[in-house]
Amino acid sequence: MKYFKQLILGIATILLLFMLSACGSSSSDSTESATDSSLSGVVVDGYLDGAKVFLDCNNNLEQDYNEVTEGWTDENGNYSLSLPDNASQCAVVALGIANQTYEHFDNGTSEMLRNNLTMVSLDNDTYRVISPFTSLHWYYMNNDNMTFEEARNQVKQELGLPSGNAVFEDFVARARDNSSYRNMVQTSLKMGEYMGYYCSQDNSTDNMTVKMRNAFRYMHQNVGMDNFTDNNIRPGRMDELFPVNIGNMQQ
């Protein structure tokens, strides 16, 4: 009888250890899966090569000390980030660095950025395009308190985009075989140029969120968004045609 009790106790112990091991394995697998989740996309004005990309979970457009997830774009503007658990709703910010980041164009030419260029995307897809259009979408959500859909429709209508989804698409790639996207390329280049130019001139604040809001507010009030869609105005001339005068902006 004593032998059978010991045998049963031994079997029960083995089963318990097996169950604990299985639970531990499941937990480990789950943790590993969460760690291995990733986010990828492209940074496009022209394609930015050597731009820093990072998660921004407090919506200040800055990489804070606890926002350690970052990556760098390749020559095609592509990036990939590991995605920490509970970070899927964070904004993704791209920082093009003056005199370091290159902008590659579809005609085979390239230029180095003259000014820092910050862009942001609030899209919640696992593939996120970051562009002047997604940045304008961010502005409407943060400055005008629009919903995601309202802001997307506002960008579409204001800039004459082919669809609301075009806000979050790689419009340079789409323009190669779809003429309705070609105007987006020129519009984006002019917007990106002016965003970088304005922020380089705005010494009223060091807060990047305020600078971005000020930039789009100035573009609306003092430049006119129609000038960014005007095909008679070529990229590279926006700072000449519309020099920044901070004092002219209404608060």
Image (cartoon, helix red, strand yellow):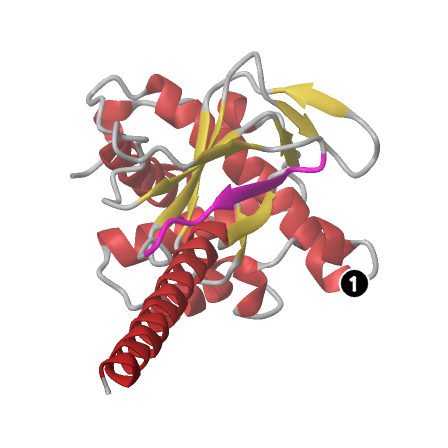
Instruction: Give me the residue at 36% from left, 25% from top.
Output: 199
Q: Residues within 10 Å of mark 1 (few under 14, many from 20)?
A: few
Who is closer to the viewer here, 249 or 166?
Answer: 166
Q: Where residue 73 sits: x, y (%)?
A: 60, 33
In the displayed image of the protein, which residue is found farthest to the top? Answer: 99
Residue for badge 1 = 178
| Magenta-colored span | 76-85
Q: Along the line of sight, which residue is nearer the eye, 182 or 75?
A: 75
Q: Nearer the viewer, residue 14 or 22?
A: 14
Q: Quadrant of residue 108?
A: top right
Q: Is residue 106 above or below residue 173?
A: above
Q: Position of residue 119 (x, y in %)?
A: 44, 39
Taking the image as shown, residue 227 lies to the left or right of residue 177, namely left
Q: Residue at x 65, y 53 (%)?
A: 170
Tell me where residue 169 appears, x and y as whole percent: 60, 58
- The percent coordinates of residue 151 (x first, y second) are 37, 64
Task: State left or right for residue 55 relative to residue 103.
Answer: left
* Picture residue at 25% right of the left edge, 53% below the top: 142
**Which amino acid does the dot numbered 1 rest on?**
Asn
- Residue 160, visible in the rendered structure: no
